[in-house]
Image (cartoon, coloured by chain):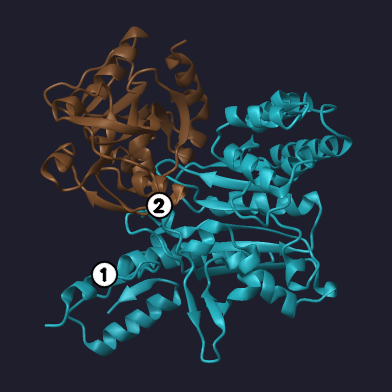
Chain colours: A brown, B cyan
Amino acid sequence: MKELPLTIALPKGRLQKQVQELFAKKGIAFDFEDRKLVAYDKDKQFKFILVKNSDLPVYLKHGIAGLGVCGSDVVYESGDEFYKLLKFSFGGTTMCLAGMKGCDYSESDRKLTVATKFTKFTEDYYSKLGVPVEIIKLNGSVELAPVLGLAPYIVDLVETGSTLKANNLEIFKKLQEISVYLLANPAYFKIHYKKIEKLVEFLSED
Amino acid sequence: MKNKHNYLRNPQGTEGLYFEEADIHKQASSSLERMFSNWGYSPVKTPVFDFYDIYEPLLDRDLKSNIYRLIDRDGDLLMLRSDITLFLAKQVGRVLRDSDLPARCFYSDTILRHQDSEDVSKNEFYQTGIELIGKPDIDGDLEVLSLLSLALDNYDTDFVIHIGSRALFDLVFSSFSTEKKAEIASKFLDRNFKPVESLLESEGFEKSKEAVDLFSLILTVEEVGLTLAKYKGLFSVAVDSEIDKILSLFSQLQECGLSHELRLDLSELGTQPYYTGFVFNAYTNLSGTAVASGGRYDKLLKKFGFDASSVGFSIMTRKLDSFFKQSSSQDVEKIEEGLSFAQRYKEAVSLTSQGKRIKL
């Protein structure tokens, strides 16, 4: 099998910076120059590709990127299954149900109307609880939904809670902790397992 | 004009091939079929649909959710062929007798099951493979694995073949219920080992760490002998005997000098519930998923009334068509223009009789 650099997909934004910092701390520097979406480290051991967060599982599933850094929320929504090789200490957040402050919330078998980006998660979560849920799919600024009366509740990621607070919303229930993982396409892992196991050891943050 | 949208798309679960793409696919399949035939395997064709009820207990949740069902004129529930091995298992019981064993057959067929429109990486509509029936010993395993390696030689890319053992898994975890074993197997398949160790400890399993270590192993042919032998004497006599079988399999495979890299990977447990012995998957760069898979299923045929062992593999040929090594003799020659049709026809007959491909 030809020795090629390990291909790692990174999501654009804050996570990309955090991964770059982690690699740099371990002595491997790389940079995406002039708006380029592909970068290599100095020794060309790694090829990094920069993709939209929600597209990352697609690149990973097709084996275009063998490895990827992604939150468990995005992977769950994609419905794909990858090997979780390493849990990072950064990027963690919580999936929460929220609504207008003071709104009367009780979890019963009454139908919930929820606005969210995370339709699969919300449907599966409430289906397991036996609570019927009507989902309104939004792609951003989900906090607006209760404020403008589109839906009384939202399911969204909450880090500090400041956006909720600014919009007079409050958390009613923490649904799940979300973590960021180093993921592998299973077939890619099988082919390059030795190099990948070394990388996992190298990136371990203990 | 009628709805043009429906002319441009196919329903999920099927695929058509045309012209050059179909030509390469046909050449690749024919090359594999020729090879299997040269090794004493006979062709078989399975029905496109069959009664659902007889297969239902053998279908796992994924397969059940992806198969197409239909109802015939008598009200019987039918299913389209979604797994050739299953359909073949029923058919061979109808046509084979004990005196015919061992029997060797090959197939090259389509399977029909739902596939997510975005999930082209699976691409499993066309499968070519072999079944070796009634050869329960290690020679059967060796024959199938070496033929897989030879079959993959038809493609211009490197492969690695990861071999696991469902038999070893069943023996190590023999004290667990079927449901618990399924839970452990599913975690091993995902290489998610940490939760298994806690699960085993909570169940009072004595050698939790050793068992998890064993099933996380990936070893090259050269590493197998030394490393695997260390796990003997830890579990049971039956486990030791299975470890000996694996050691013997790898030692003989090494002696055969197969052209593709083989590895022992005990997290390979087979995704189908009918596997009972060794299981394997073949991978290549950029495939995204396994390109060939197989193993031993010694109890499957008995479920259809014919008690014989079976071992085999399937190659997902569409995933590999672009790597097929085409020979130059497969190029199509254009007959010189300007000649009369009769002259061109005669030249064409002469060239085709030499095995060449022509275009008038």
Confirm whether residue B222 shows in the render.
no
User: Residue at label 2?
Assistant: A109
Tell me the kind of residue under disc 1: Arg
Does A21 sit left or right of A165 as displayed?
right
Crowd class of label 1 (few under 14; some 14 to 19; many from 20; radius 10 Å): few
The residue sitting at 14% across, 30% down in the picture is: A167
Quarter of the image with the C terminus of chain B in it: bottom left
Quarter of the image with the N terminus of chain B in it: bottom left
Q: Is residue A186 above or below residue A32?
A: below
Q: Residue A206: where, in percent of width, then height?
A: 47, 10
Does B317 sit left or right of A27 as displayed?
right
Q: Is residue A126 above or below residue A199?
A: below
Q: Are marks 1 and 2 in contact (CB under 8 Å)?
A: no
Q: Quadrant of residue B322?
A: bottom left
The residue sitting at 15% across, 82% down in the picture is: B2
**A5 and B39: which is toward the camera:** A5
**A82 and A169: which is toward the camera:** A169
**Nearer the observer, disc 1 or disc 2?**
2
User: Circle 1 — which element?
Assistant: loop
Q: Pointer 1 indicates a residue of which chain?
A: B
Q: Residue B270: where, in percent of width, then height?
A: 62, 49
The residue sitting at 35% across, 23% down in the picture is: A92
Q: Residue B112: where, in percent of width, then height?
A: 46, 69
Tell me the kind of residue under disc 2: Asp
User: Residue at label 1?
Assistant: B9
Alpha carbons under labels 1 and 2: distance apart? 41 Å
Q: Residue A157: where, in percent of width, then height?
A: 28, 32
Does B97 sit left or right of B70 as displayed?
right
- As drawn, the residue found furthest toward the right would be B237
The residue sitting at 76% across, 58% down in the picture is: B298
